Image: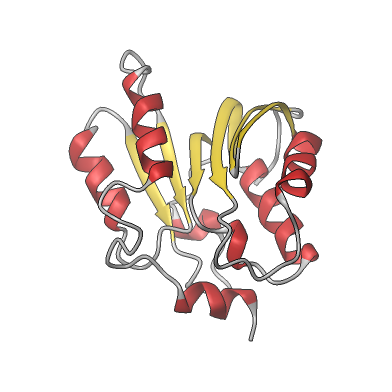
Amino acid sequence: MSWQERAKRSFRAKGAVGKYPLMYRRLRTYLDTQQERHLSVLDYGSGPGEVHTKRLRDDYPDHHFDSYDLNHLGTTVQAACCGAMWYDVIVASNVLNVIEDKQALNDTINEIYSWTAPQGVVLCNLPKSPRYLDVDEDYIESQLKYHFHVVQRDGNEFLAAHPRMSIVEH
């Protein structure tokens, strides 16, 4: 079974990880500190129901929210998100843990990086369960550090900021 098929089986269409899961609480805290800015936010791996994205749209109408459902196999972020060039904030909650091989994991991190705006931030995590690939938080941190100037880690949660290269063509 491919990692995309596993992701599809573990999707969050009904908010399976709770009404306000930890990564989205962290995102809300960040958005609360950025009220003077109009931010573009991508929920990378939202699940087909866009449950958390819809709540964020309702609660933060001054920001722009797109969602990317990993279940749309073969669909790029650009096609799924109306062609936005970059996002100020990308949240990837419960995404990295369902990927089965390092190449797919690296491709996913590369894709997230390529959609991060200059001065943008990425919030992501590596839950302990389920975890389909034998990588740890140190590995994820090293991959994020390859792309971002600042990587902060709190257990299995990461905040990456300021992409190393600010121009990525789409």
Residue at 27% across, 41% down: 56
Which residue occupies the extreme left position in the image? 58
How many numbered callouts? 0
How far across and down, in percent of the image, does residue 60 sit?
24, 32
Question: In the rendered image, which quarter is residue 127 located in?
Answer: bottom right
Q: Is 103 on the left or on the right of 58, as rendered?
A: right
Question: In the rendered image, which quarter is residue 58 located in?
Answer: top left
> In the displayed structure, would residue 99 be above or below residue 153?
below
Instruction: Quarter of the image for the N terminus: give it.
Output: bottom right
How far across and down, in percent of the image, does residue 159 sit?
58, 32
Which residue occupies the extreme top position in the image? 36
> In the displayed structure, would residue 40 be above or below residue 119?
below
Q: Is 115 on the left or on the right of 102, as rendered?
A: left
Q: Is 48 on the left or on the right of 119, as rendered?
A: left
Looking at this view, is 74 or 160 the one in front?
A: 160
Question: In the rendered image, which quarter is residue 133 located in?
Answer: bottom right
How far across and down, in percent of the image, does residue 109 sit?
68, 50
Residue at 56% across, 47% down: 125
Q: Is 110 on the left or on the right of 75, as rendered?
A: right
Residue at 51% across, 66% down: 70
Looking at this view, is 69 or 101 the one in front?
A: 101
Residue at 45% across, 44% down: 42
> In the displayed structure, would residue 139 be above or below residue 162?
below
Colour convention of the picture: secondary structure
